[in-house]
Amino acid sequence: LRFDQNGITSCELGDFGEGIGQCAELTSIRLDFSFNRICGKGLGRLGQGVGGCKKLTTIRMAFYGNQITDEEFGEFGEGLGSCAVLGTLHLGFACNQLGDDKLGRFAVGIAKASK
């Protein structure tokens, strides 16, 4: 699904995450949220929602050109880490405002998906 260049906010992203989390049979997801107005808030809710899709084997998401910061990046990774059968993960976060503050927490969260 392509949602690029639609003015989507962090709140709307979080709402989408809660909704997608109800799709219990989903096995693959490809989402493009590039060039919106996402600043981090709601990213954690998206991760938690996607993490609720226990049958996901492939996740591809793009968030290029937003204003995403470290704020909920760790929680996003922890949510995705709930995908127990995840085999393929492609994420694009270029041209955002991520530092190294939460990258460790993100990595630990994602690592849970392979266990």
Image: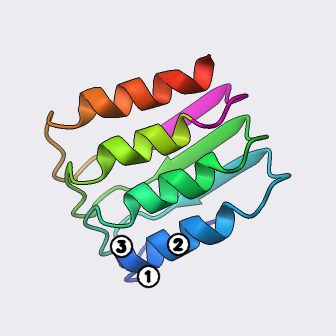
Density class for disc 3 (Cα within 10 Å; few <14, some 14-19, many ≥20) is: many
Image position of 5 with respect to 86: above or below: below
Residue that mark 3 sits on: 10
- Amino acid type of disc 3? Ser
Residue 100, x across and y down, in percent = 15, 33
Tell me if label 2 and label 1 are in contact, CB under 8 Å. yes
Q: Residue at x 37, y 46 (%)?
A: 75
User: How far, Cα to Cα, is label 3 from label 2?
Assistant: 13 Å
Density class for disc 2 (Cα within 10 Å; few <14, some 14-19, many ≥20) is: some
Seen as rendered, the residue at the extreme right is: 25
Q: Nearer the viewer, residue 60 or 5?
A: 60
The quadrant of the rendering that contains the N terminus is bottom right
Residue 84 magenta: yes
Residue 113, x across and y down, in percent = 59, 26
Compare marks 3 and 2 and give the one earlier in the sequence: 2
User: How far, Cα to Cα, is label 1 from label 3?
Assistant: 12 Å
Residue that mark 1 sits on: 6
Q: Which mark is residue 34?
A: none
Q: Residue at x 36, y 78 (%)?
A: 9
User: How far, Cα to Cα, is label 2 from label 1?
Assistant: 6 Å
Residue that mark 2 sits on: 3
Q: Residue at x 31, y 47 (%)?
A: 73
Q: Which residues are magenta?
A: 82-93
- Amino acid type of disc 1? Asn
Please tell me in which quadrant of the rendered image residue 35 appears. bottom left
Please tell me in which quadrant of the rendered image residue 114 appears. top right
